[in-house]
């Protein structure tokens, strides 16, 4: 498909951004919504396969339901001129494979924050029940401001439905980043994506993947049975804890790895500090995309942090004592308990009145003898 073609009277292809064994990628304009998008047009031999068409539509719908800052948003998909296409968010920048080729390798401080973002996007998909199946640096787009987004969700899963005879080394996944279970033809799981992330991390820090070979079969054998060169031979000063994490991620048995990308991301966060605006969210959050920013494709300008005003410390003012009522003068007679006094006088009189009676009785029984 050439530039300038109008797909379904809506998407105007402007320029080709890349080409691969599976599809061509174009920068295009959505005439209905007046915005720039990226469109991946699949090869005709896949597009005309009825079984693949059905699976592609199903997987594209699943991918379109993913909304996360570290996942490329899928806007639409369709079929035109006997070709399947998928419409995605347009991300300015380069894929991670291009950056590795340009830089050679990344330092721990530069590379781990990118892997943490990839873990956030893949972990969100794992929680949604989706496995990427084709995690590789080619499918990780990095914008000029350092935001990483994972792309091509669903396409690899649709390709997995094809029979082995219909697959090619170029199209069917990426043997450089295969997990051992994928190399053996088994169904991938979230732990398979974690292994592929480990291969990407190894290549990001060393400048070379853990296994290289001249054929896909040899690469598959290496992933299944061989041990990679210890990463410390490439990076002598690598933290021991990080070396152990990478070894765990590249375990041959899925049960020996981290189960999901979320778990891997959490243990990696202490090795790299992300800017606040790039910290992966703990809860799913929708992506708000500015049409103007997409249309201009301009690198994100450096943001000058707005200085926060110093908090004003309130001065301490001692509380005023609560007003007390003035004591009224008390009369001395008010302090006398007149009830008690009255009862006391009554008792005295009663006792005193009995004295003559007792004297009379005494003398009656004891008369005075003269």
Image (cartoon, rainbow, N blue to C red):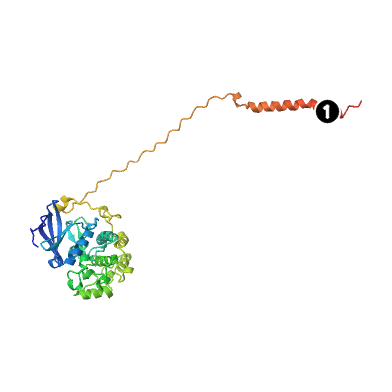
Query: How far from the left and from the top, in percent, is residue 288?
Result: 22, 51
Relative depth, front residue between 58 and 189: 58
From this viewpoint, which residue is outermost toward the right?
370
Q: Which quadrant: the N terminus? A: bottom left
Q: Is residue 168 among the parts visible in the rendering?
A: no
Q: Which quadrant: the C terminus? A: top right
Q: Is residue 344 among the parts visible in the rendering?
A: yes
Q: Is residue 350 left or right of residue 173?
A: right
Q: Is residue 16 left or right of residue 363?
A: left
Query: How far from the left and from the top, in percent, is residue 10?
Result: 11, 55
Q: Is residue 191 left or right of residue 53?
A: right
Query: How far from the left and from the top, in percent, is residue 145?
Result: 20, 55
Counting every numbered tag in the picture gives 1
Can you tell which quarter of the image residue 173 is in?
bottom left
Up-down: is 208 above or below 35?
Answer: below
Identify the residue position indicated by label 1 in the image: 361
**Residue at the location (73% across, 25% down)?**
349
Relative depth, front residue between 6 and 72: 6
**Residue at the location (18% across, 73% down)?**
165
Query: How far from the left and from the top, in percent, is residue 293?
Result: 16, 51
Can you tell which quarter of the image residue 350 is in?
top right
Up-down: is 365 above or below 182?
Answer: above
Can you tell which quarter of the image residue 171 is in?
bottom left
The kind of secondary structure element at disc 1 is helix
Relative depth, front residue between 36 and 271: 36
Q: How packed is label 1: few (under 14 Cα within 10 Å), some, or many (20 or more)? A: few
Up-down: is 173 above or below 39?
Answer: below
Q: Is residue 267 left or right of residue 354?
A: left
């Amino acid at each position: 498909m050439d530039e300038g073609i109008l797909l379904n009277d809506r998407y105007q292809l402007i320029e080709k951004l890349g080409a691969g064994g599976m599809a061509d990628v174009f920068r295009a304009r959505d005439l209905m919504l007046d915005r720039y998008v990226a469109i991946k047009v699949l090869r005709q031999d896949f597009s005309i396969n009825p079984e693949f068409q059905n699976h592609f539509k199903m997987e594209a719908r699943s991918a379109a339901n993913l909304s996360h800052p570290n996942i490329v948003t899928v806007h639409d998909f369709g079929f035109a001129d006997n070709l399947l296409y998928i419409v995605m968010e347009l991300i300015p920048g380069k894929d991670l494979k291009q950056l590795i080729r340009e830089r050679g390798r990344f330092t721990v401080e530069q590379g781990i924050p990118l892997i943490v973002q990839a873990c956030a996007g893949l972990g969100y998909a794992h929680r949604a029940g989706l496995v990427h199946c084709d995690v590789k640096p080619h499918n990780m787009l990095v914008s000029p401001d350092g935001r990483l987004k994972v792309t091509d969700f669903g396409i690899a899963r649709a390709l997995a439905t094809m029979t082995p005879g219909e697959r090619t080394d170029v199209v069917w996944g990426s043997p450089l980043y295969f997990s051992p279970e994928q190399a053996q033809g088994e169904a991938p799981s979230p732990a398979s994506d974690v292994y592929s992330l480990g291969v990407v991390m190894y290549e990001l820090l060393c400048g070379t993947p853990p296994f290289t070979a001249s054929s896909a079969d040899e690469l598959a054998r290496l992933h299944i049975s061989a041990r990679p060169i210890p990463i410390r031979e490439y990076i002598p000063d690598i933290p021991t804890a990080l070396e152990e994490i990478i070894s765990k991620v590249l375990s041959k048995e899925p049960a020996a790895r981290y189960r999901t990308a979320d778990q891997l991301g959490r243990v990696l966060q202490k090795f790299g500090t992300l800017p606040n605006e790039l910290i992966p969210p703990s809860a799913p959050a929708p992506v708000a995309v500015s049409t103007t920013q997409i249309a201009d494709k301009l690198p994100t300008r450096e943001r000058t942090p707005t200085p926060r005003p110093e908090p004003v410390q309130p001065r301490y003012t001692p509380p005023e004592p609560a007003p007390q009522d003035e004591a009224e003068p008390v009369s001395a007679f008010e302090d006398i308990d007149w009830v008690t006094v009255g009862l006391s006088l009554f008792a005295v009189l009663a006792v005193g009145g009995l004295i003559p009676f007792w004297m009379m009785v005494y003398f009656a029984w004891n008369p005075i003898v003269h």
